[in-house]
Amino acid sequence: MKDIAGWALETAKLSGANLCEVRIVHERNRALATKNGRIGNAQDAETIGAGIRVLAEGAWGFSATQDLSRDGMQKCAAHAVEIAKASARVKTHDVRLAEEPPAQVDWGSPCVIDPFGVSVEKNIDLLMRIDAILRGVQGITLAETNMNFRRYEQWFFSSEGSQIHQTRTVTGAGFAVYSFEGSEIQKRSYPNSFGGQWMNRGYELIDELKLEDNARRIAEECVALHKADQCPQKVGTLILDSSQLGLQIHESVGHPIELDRVLGMEANFAGTSFLTLDKLNNLKYGSDLVNVVADATEQHGPGLGTFAYDDEGVQAQCVPIIQQGEFVGYLSSRDTAAMIGRERSGGDMRAESWNRVPIVRMTNISILPGENNMGLEDLIADTDDGMLLQTNRSWSIDDKRYNFQFSCELGWEIKKGKRTRMLKNPSYSGITTEFWNSLDAICGKKEWILWGTPNCGKGQPQQVMGTGHGASPARFRNIKIGTAFS
């Protein structure tokens, strides 16, 4: 791979580039799914190619190719330089980069059992057994299961001297059930909605998820929702489970802290941000219990935002975003970091594959657990009057990431420290900073889960990226509840 990248690096230099980065990516994906006792999807795909990004005459250029011959790489590099020079004609300023020392690294994400070493037949058998348990519950009208594996191997070379080889193995699985009754549809998912749980791990994750053990309970909850009372509309106390809080972080913290949105460089997908530069170190984002980090390091966990180096060769870091409620950090690239006077990028540049230019993306954006031993049941016992909402069903947030509304699959009324009745169609809404400032309790480390979100969309053309969000259940006061279905 070094020789292949070298042909591009040399051509870019001779063509007038001041900087050249070559990413060669070999990717394999396996996706399996069932739907009501039949195979819904069985796919195994593989791709390899190179993306070349250059800086010439103060502007960026990018080109990609699957032709890894000398001629193919030289043509691709020359094309990238040509695009950069064309872009330079309309530039408003020269691109400047925060410094980053070159690195020579060989890294792989944790993987005990190679998921591609497990037969498709064994995986389908497991999904079919889950499907049978789900549809064995009277009232279930639709059952869907899925299992997904991805191996992403990348070689990164730069004209600054970096030679970085990384391999990430991703495993994900889950199921969902639906119950149709009259004009009403109820849904339950496990262990999370929109695909279950995903991590940078091997097949060992499948066993740990205990999918079969939880199938009947989830199906019975789905059917029971039809007989549950409607979630009342009120202003009150809200407890979110860790999976819903993870998505709340994604939408109301993760996206607004992307510096390319803040600077107006990205607005093609889901808008910009309310976090203008004057708010950095000058905004009470949340209560004193709110501590959020952007952490791509292995120490944080094997989330979908975990790696050793990002896609412009910046080392993975733990960057404070909110400290005791104060807003202190953005997600950045080398050029956006330089634009706001930062000496180093936070290491947040990532590309969907070899044929996409890296853009600022979330890594693992997580709220840190409380410094206590409080579990979810302890938090419920400490709540006199409130509601517990579990598992996201849908969401909406404005293009500044300020006003939002979420609905969940399942709700529980809490009275005098105990769960009382099940509630259907629960929802809540709010304003980002008011919401986070209303947090008055968060559970400790034993309840903290690093959730994987495999389908975050951004950019034009759209790129899909995996992100991670760690959270423990938390309690919020004076929240508008139940308005979505009133």
Image (cartoon, rainbow, N blue to C red):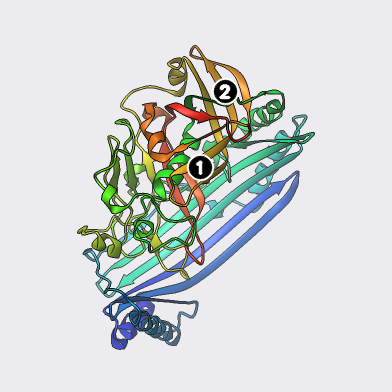
Front residue of 396 and 37: 396
Amino acid bearing label 1: Leu
Question: Residue 258: x percent and y percent?
Answer: 37, 54
Q: Please give the name of the residue rendered at 41% of the width and 34% of the height, measured from the top-left corner.
A: 435
- Name above or below for residue 220 compared with residue 351: above
Does residue 292 appear to the left or right of 248 in the view shown? Answer: left
Q: Quadrant of the C terminus?
A: top right
Disc 1 on helix, strand or loop?
helix
| Residue located 41% across and 85% down the image | 70
Quadrant location, the N terminus: bottom left
Q: Quadrant of residue 19?
A: bottom left
**In front: 348, or 134?**
348
Residue under label 1, please give it.
Answer: 205
Q: Nearer the viewer, residue 205 or 176?
A: 176
- CB of mark 1 within 8 Å of CB of mark 2? no
At horizontal 33% and vertical 39% (from top left) the residue drawn is: 285
Q: In the rendered structure, which amino acid carries the disc numbered 2?
A: Trp
Q: Is residue 191 visible?
A: no
Give the left or right position of residue 345, taking residue 68 as reference. left
Residue visible at 52% across and 25% down in the picture: 388
Q: Position of residue 20 (x, y in %)?
A: 31, 76
Left or right of residue 390: residue 366: left
The residue carrying mark 2 is 412
Q: Measured along the vertical axis of the image, is residue 130 above or below residue 55?
A: above
Position of residue 256 measured from the top left corner of the image (x, y, whole percent): 39, 50
